[in-house]
Amino acid sequence: MQVPLFPLNTVLFPGGPLPLRIFETRYLDMISRCLKTESAFGVLLIRDGRESGPATTHDVGTLARIVDWYQGSDGLLGITAIGEERFRLLASHRQADGLNIGEIELLPNEPSMPLPDDYREIATILTGVLDDLGRLYESLERRMDDAGWVTSRFVEILPIDLEQKQLCLEQSDPIERLRIVRQVLEAGRR
């Protein structure tokens, strides 16, 4: 499977929102094609380099599908995409216009797992945080009883290192991610 790639300094999780402001021609063209064909693009965390230039990326990322777009008052295109499936990058090449195209394999979907009772306080905290975040999280279907969904939303919003977020994306065990979230929350209380 081939998809256009968008290397970013962010980690996108399945089910999570991704607001972007698009200004580079290669990405304006990519967004236009994705909108016309209702296709997804791949988001990968930058390992080395910049968003506006050449970059090397991690191999595990998330497909993103555009759900909204607008023209900003500054003339820039704004989009909101939602994370779909995780993937592994097998190979990539750069087109003449600078857009990277990746050959990917989809990773297995994480099975739905009930949130264990001893982690219920994390879901309660998350509910309040998402309510405070406003528009970006308003339209998301909330699944506060699903361990994977709860941990993915928490890792998205926690002020932790991008490499830690990437490790959580690559981790397919929601219970292990819950432990990480709890450790970060407990460290913040100290």
Image: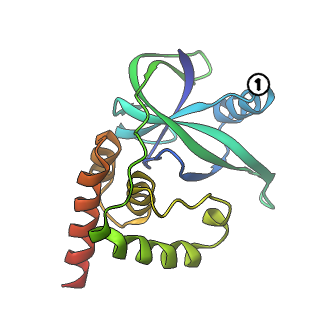
Circle 1 packing at 10 Å, graded few (<14), some (14-19), many (20+), is few
The amino acid type found where label 1 is placed reads: Thr
Q: Position of residue 81 (x, y in %)?
A: 64, 46
Residue sitting at 67 percent across and 44 percent down? 23
Q: Residue furthest bottom?
A: 190
Return the residue nearer the eye: 66 or 23.
66
Q: Position of residue 131 (x, y in %)?
A: 58, 76
Front residue of 178/25: it is: 178
Q: Left or right: where does residue 14 sit relative to residue 31?
A: left
Read off the residue under disc 1. Answer: 37
> How many dots with numbers?
1
Can you say whether 169 is above or below 100 in the image? Answer: below
Residue 179 image-quadrant placement: bottom left
Quadrant (top left, top right, bottom left, bottom right) of the C terminus: bottom left
The percent position of residue 100, horizontal first and vertical second, equals: 52, 23
Give the image's coloring scheme: rainbow
Residue at 70 percent across and 34 percent down: it is 31
Left or right, 177 with respect to 104, comes to left
Q: Residue at x 62, y 58 (%)?
A: 140
Give the answer, above or below, for where 133 lies relative to 95: below
**Residue 74 shown left or right of residue 99 in the figure:** right
Q: Residue at x 52, y 40 (%)?
A: 52
Question: How far across and how far down the image is residue 35, in percent?
Answer: 76, 33
Most foreground residue, 70 or 185: 185
Q: Is residue 102 above or below residue 20?
A: above
Please tell me whether mark 1 sits on a helix, a strand or a loop: helix
Residue 104 occupies quadrant: top left
